[in-house]
Amino acid sequence: MKLFLDSSVLLAAAGSATGASRALFDLAAANQWTLTTSRYCLAETLKNIGKLSPAAIAQWEDVLAGRLVVVQDAVALRKPLAFSKGKDKPVLITALAEDCDALLTLDRKDFATVLNTRVYSLHVCTPAMFLEHQRAQGRLEGL
């Protein structure tokens, strides 16, 4: 399964060893998840990682960053997309263009209109929603 992580999830994973965002990294190998992000999200993460603790920065640099597949940003789709949030539209478009199964975000404001729904085949949800769904479907290994 291919998961697209936006910068809010990347920062949360670095900042907390016990949250759902970090669990994605901890459970990825056992569940055969590919953790994907874009250059855009990576740049936003690097811009904001300095606001976190030194331990969080070390976790990002030493553990988390190396577990990601970083893809090129997509700027257009061959399908109509009714999503008006300018700065987050490239995130949604890239996740769709990369054929990801889910876009995971903690940005409840900008993704409010699509959160916990599907945009074409892409499930847009929070990490906690995703993990709960996987557990309910009996597809969560490693817990």
Image (spheres, grey):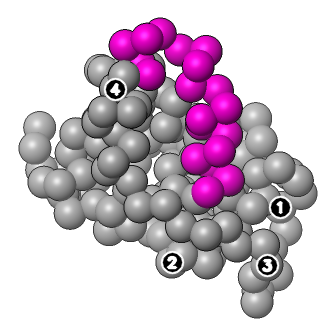
According to the image, label 1 marks what residue? 83
Q: Amino acid at mark 4?
A: Gln
Q: Is residue 28 covered in magenta?
A: no
In depth, the one of 96 and 132 nearer the eye is 96
Q: Nearer the viewer, mark 4 or mark 2?
A: 4
Mark 4 or mark 3: whose residue is earlier in sequence: 4
Quarter holding residue 82:
bottom right
> In terms of secondary structure, where does tag 1 sit?
loop
Q: Nearer the viewer, mark 1 or mark 3?
A: 3
| Percent position of residue 75, x then y | 78, 72
For label 2, the SS is loop
Q: For residue 44: magenta?
A: yes
Picture quarter with the N terminus = bottom left
Report if residue 10 is visible in the image: yes
Instruction: Tell me if mark 3 has few (under 14), some (14-19) or many (20+) residues whose alpha carbon lies within 10 angstroms of its own.
Output: some
Instruction: Indicate left or right for 52 with 60 as reference.
Output: right
Do tag 3 and tag 2 residues touch (Cβ < 8 Å)? no
| x and y percentages locating residue 74 in the rendered image | 70, 73
The residue sitting at 33% across, 48% down in the picture is: 66
User: Which amino acid, mark 1?
Assistant: Phe
Q: Earlier in the sequence, mark 2 or mark 1?
A: 1
Q: State which region is magenta.
A: 39-57
**Residues at circles 4 and 2 in contact by the CB criterion of under 8 Å:** no
Gap in angstroms between the C-alphas marked 3 and 2? 14 Å
Residue on which disc 2 sits: 99
Q: Residue at x 50, y 50 (%)?
A: 5
Residue 59 is marked as 4
